[in-house]
Amino acid sequence: MSERPAPEVIGVVGHPRYAGMSGTVGALGAFANERGLTLQAEEDLLGLLPGAAPLEPASLDLLVTLGGDGTLLRGARLVAGRSTLVLGVNLGHLGFLTSIAPERLGEALDAVLAGDYWVDRRATLQAEVEGVPGRTFTALNDVVVHLSGMARLIRLALHVGEGDAREHVGTYSADGLILATPTGSTAYSLSAGGPIVSPGMECILATPINPHSLTVRPLVIAASTQVSISLLPPHREAILTVDGQQSVPVQDGRSVRVRSGTAPVHLVRFPGQSFFATLREKMHWATPQQGAAPESGPTMDARAREDEAGA
C-alpha cells in the first residue's frame, strides 16, 4: 500500500453534461468539508462547488476526474510529470482507465486518505512537429498522424533513431499511423488491429490505420528510441492528433518526432484491481465461453462482485 502523505489539496475536473454530475460533485464537496480538505475545480464546475478555488494543477495532491476515459486523459495531461495522484470516477460508458463508480467515491477517498491504495505509474509520449518551436505535446494514450476531410489514403515514412543512427523503417500507405503507449494499446491502436500491451512494458507501438497492404503489420519499438513520421507527396498537409483531443497541422517536409515522455501519470488503484482483471471485466477479454466449466476458485472479478453485493 502507499506510504505517501494523505492528500490535502484536491482538484476536480469534469464536464457538467454528464448525468449524475451534480450529485457526485455535491458528495465530493461534502466529503472535503467534513475532512477539512481544500478543493479546487476547473471553471465549468465552480458553480457546483461553493467555496472551491480555481484549479491550479501545480498545487494539487490528488486530481479527481469525473466523466469517462476522455476526461481522465484531459486531467492526466494537466498533472503529467508531477507527483499528483489521479483518481478517475466513471460517469461515462466503458471507463477503462477510471477506477471507481460514482456511488463508491466516498469509500475510495477514505481509502486514499488512509493510504489503502497503490500507484499505477503510466508512461507518456512527447511529440513535437519539426519547425514548430516551443510546442511539445504530452500523450497518455497516443499520437496519430492522419488526413483531415475526406477519407483518403496518406503516404507516410517512418524512421527510428537520431543522427547517424537514424534508420528508415518503411513507407505506409494507409488512413494514418498511430504511435501509442502501452496504456494506449487498448484504445485506438487496438481498434486498428494493434496488440494489447501490459502497461508495465517500456515500448512504443506503431499501428497503421487500414493499411493498403496485406504485409504491413503493427510494430513494437523500444521506448528509448525516437520515432519520426514524415508526410510524403502528393499530400501537403496532415493533422497530428494527441489523445484524440488536441491537434496541430503538419506541413509538407516537416516531421513529427515522438519519444517516450519524461512526465509519467500516477493513477490510483485499489486492492483487487489489475490491468488483466479490467480487461476481463470491461472488455470481456479471454473470459470463459458460455457453458464452459468454471475455474477452480473464485476469480478476482467474482470476489469484487461479492464485495459489492455485501456492501
Image (cartoon, grey):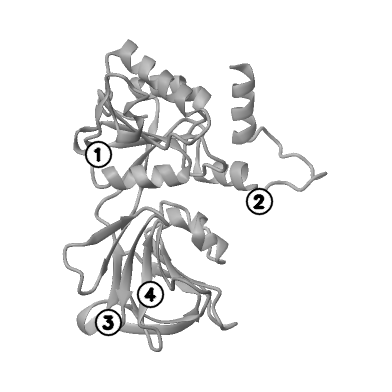
Q: Are marks 1 and 3 in contact (CB under 8 Å)?
A: no
Label 1: which residue? 83
Q: Are marks 4 and 2 in contact (CB under 8 Å)?
A: no
Label 3: which residue? 166
Counting residues from the start of the chain, the first of labels 1 and 4 encountered is 1
Of 155 and 163, the residue lying toward us: 155
Counting residues from the start of the chain, the first of labels 1 and 2 encountered is 1
Q: CA distance from mark 3 to mark 2?
A: 39 Å
Of 146 and 162, the residue lying toward us: 146
Q: Is residue 260 visible?
A: yes
How crowded pointer 2 is (Cα within 10 Å; few <14, some 14-19, many 20+) is rated as: few
> Which amino acid lies under the numbered mark 1 shown in the image of this protein?
Ser
Kindly give the residue lying farthest to the bottom in the view shown: 234
How crowded pointer 3 is (Cα within 10 Å; few <14, some 14-19, many 20+) is rated as: some
> Which amino acid lies under the numbered mark 4 shown in the image of this protein?
Ala
Counting residues from the start of the chain, the first of labels 3 and 4 encountered is 3
How crowded pointer 1 is (Cα within 10 Å; few <14, some 14-19, many 20+) is rated as: some
Quadrant of the rendered image containing residue 234:
bottom left
Q: Are marks 3 and 2 in contact (CB under 8 Å)?
A: no
**Viewer-nearest of labels 3 and 4?**
4
For label 4, the SS is strand
Residue 115 percent coordinates (x, y):
34, 24
> Which amino acid lies under the numbered mark 2 shown in the image of this protein?
Ala
Counting residues from the start of the chain, the first of labels 1 and 3 encountered is 1
For label 2, the SS is loop
Q: Is residue 190 left or right of residue 46?
A: right
Residue at the spot 47% in from the left edge and 29% down from the top edge: 21
